[in-house]
Image (cartoon, rainbow, N blue to C red):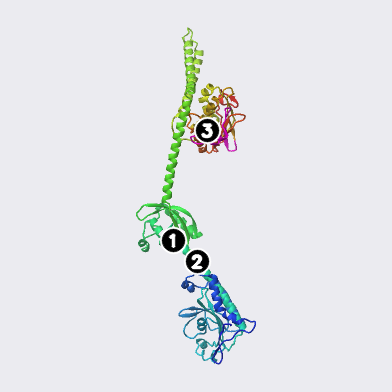
Amino acid sequence: MASPVHNADPGGREQSFTSPPGTALSDLASESVASRSEDLRATDMRVEVDRLHNMQVPADIMRKWQEIADLLADIVNVPSALIMRVEPPNIKVLVSSESKGNPYEPDELACLNTGLYCETVMNTRRPLIVPDALQDEAWKSNPDIKLGMISYLGVPISWPDGEIFGTICVLDRKSNGYSDLYLRLLLQWRDVLQADLRSIATTQREIEQREAKIRRLVDANIIGIVIWNDEGRILDANSEYLRIVGYDQHDLLSGRVSWADMTPAEWRDRDALMMSEVKNKGAVQPFEKEYIRKDGSRIPVLIGIATLEGTDSQGVAFVLDLTERRRAEVEARESERRFRSMQTELAHANRLATLGQLTASITHEVKQPITAALLNTQTAQRFLAREQPDVERAKKAIDRAVLNGMRVTEVVDRTHALVRKEPTRKDSLEINETISEVIGLTRGEVSKNSVQLRTQFAEGLPFIQGSRVQIQQVMLNLIVNAVEAMSQMSDEPRELLISTQAEADSILVAVRDSGPGLSEGAIDRAFEAFYTTKSSGLGMGLSICRSIVEDHGGRLWAAANVPTGAAFQFTIPIDSDAGTDHELRLPTSALPSTAVA
C-alpha cells in the first residue's frame, strides 16, 4: 500500500492519492520516512544534536542551494521557491529564489504554531499540496495568503539523525494543482539537500573527533599546551603547562601569567624574531629556551608554536619540560667521563705491564750508549794526557760521547712518555717516525729472541691526527705479542715485518709475523676483553688497542699471514688539516725495506 501525500482539495477536504501505474509516486512520497531511516542506519552518526542542528550551512553549499531554488522556481514557473529551516520558536527563510514577484527575503523569520504551510509539512513529515488556499476552509487563515501566496507544494528535509531540518517548497499567487512531475522534482532536490546535510554532519563529526583528540591530549597533560595572544598574555593553558611554569589556575584567570614576563632577558630578542616569523609563516620550528618560573627559578623547555586558523594575533604552543633530559645529558657526560678515565687507567696499566716485559731490552738500550760514552770520555782523556795533547782526536771522542748521551736521553724520554699518566692529547703525527721510536725501544727484546725485524715504510705519507703515546702503545703491544708468539718456535725462521701505506683517506699499518698464527676461533675472539692465549696474560692488551684505534676513527683487525703466522692491521684517518707538504723526519733505521735486527 503506497503512503499518502497530504493534499487539500478546493472543497476544503483533505484527500489522499497514489501515483499512477509505473510512476511509483507513492514510493517517492513515502521516501521522507524511509530515506530518513536509511540515512540514519547508513551513516550511524553519533553527533551532538544541539551543535549539529544549530551550526551554519557552509557558504559553498548555500551558493549551491541558491542555484537549486532559482532553477526550481524557473522550471515550475512560480514566483517563489524556498528552502526553510526550523529555528524554534521560529522558522526562517534560509534560501529564497531570486525570481520576479517573490515576496520572501532571506533570513526572514516567522513564528511557529501560526498555521504555516511548512509547519504542517514538518509536523506530518509528509509532502503537502495546497492547490488553492482561498477555496480551502482549512487554509483560508494561512499567513502566507496575506502575501498573495495561495498555492503550495512542499516536502520535509531531515538531518541524518532523523531530526527535521526544514522544508523545500514552491508557492504561487494563482491556483496551481502541481503535477506529479513537479512533486517528483521536489523530492529529488530534497534528496540532494539531505545528501549535503549528511556531508555537513560527517564534517562536523570529524571536527568533533579531532577536537576530542586534541582535548584528550590537552587533558592528558603529557605536554604543556597553551593558547596565547600577540601581546604575550596566556589566554588558556592545561595543568602540565601551569606545572612547568609554577603558576595555578587562579593566576591564569587573573591574567598574571604572561609569556613575555616568563622569558629571560637574553631570550627576548629571539622571541621577538620568533613572533615575527610565526605571523609571516603561521608556524616556527620547535626551539629550546628557558622560562622563569613563578618562584624565580629557571626551567629549560622545548617549544613549538603556530597561529590559530583565521587569526595571526592568537596561537597555540606546545611546551615540553627538558629538565629530565638535561639531567640525563649531564649524567651521560659524567658517565662518559668516568668511562674515559677508566679507559685511560687501563691503558696506562697495560703500558706499564708491557714495558715491564721490556725491562731487559730497555736496560740494554740505556747501558749500551752509557758504556760507549764512558769509553769515549776515557779515550779523550788519554789524548789530552799525552806530552803533546792530541786536541783534535780528543774533541772527536768527546763529540761521540755527547751523541751517546743524547741517545740515552732519547731512550729515557720515550720510556718516560709511555710510563707517565697524562690527559690524552691528539697532535699532528708522522706515522713512520712514531713507529720507529717504538722499534728502538723493542730492539733488545727482538734481538734476544733472534727475530729478524724488517720495515717497509711508504715515503711521503700524510700526517695523521692522534695521540703519540696511544699510537705507540698499540704498536708496542703488537710487536711484543708477535715476538712472544715466535719465541715458542724452535727451528723455523722468526721474521717480523712492519709496513705502512697510504689508503684513500687513511694510513694502513700492518704488523706481520711468521709465528704459529691464530686459529679461526682465536681470530674471532682476539679482541674480546679478558680473552688470551697466553698462560700468564690478562687478555686486555688487544681489547685496549682496538678501543684506542677506534677512538682515533680507525679500525683494528687480525688475519692469517701468508704463508704462516698472524697479521694485525689497523688504519688511522689522515689529518685533513695538515696537508702532505712536509719534511719527512725518518731516522736511518726507518728507511723503506730496511732490516733493523
Assess whether residue 200 is covered by the magenta stretch. no
Q: Earlier in the sequence, mark 3 or mark 2?
A: 2
Assess whether residue 531 is covered by the magenta stretch. yes
Q: What residue is shown with label 2?
A: 207
Q: What residue is shown with label 3?
A: 429
Residue 528 appears anywhere in the view:
yes
Q: What residue is shown with label 1?
A: 218
Q: Name the residue nearer the viewer: 159 or 459.
A: 159
Q: Position of residue 420 (x, y in %)?
A: 44, 30
Q: Secondary structure at mark 1?
A: helix
Amino acid residing under circle 1: Val
Question: Marks 1 and 3, Cα distance to the nearest angstrom?
Answer: 58 Å
Q: Name the residue nearer the viewer: 573 or 27.
A: 27
Question: Marks 3 and 2, Cα distance to the nearest angstrom?
Answer: 66 Å
Q: Residue at x 50, y 25 (%)?
A: 441
Residue range corresponding to the magenta coloring: 503-532
Above or below, 383 relative to 178: above
Q: Earlier in the sequence, mark 2 or mark 1?
A: 2
Q: Position of residue 208 (x, y in %)?
A: 48, 67
Q: Residue at x 43, y 42 (%)?
A: 335
Report which quarter residue 512 is drawn in.
Answer: top right
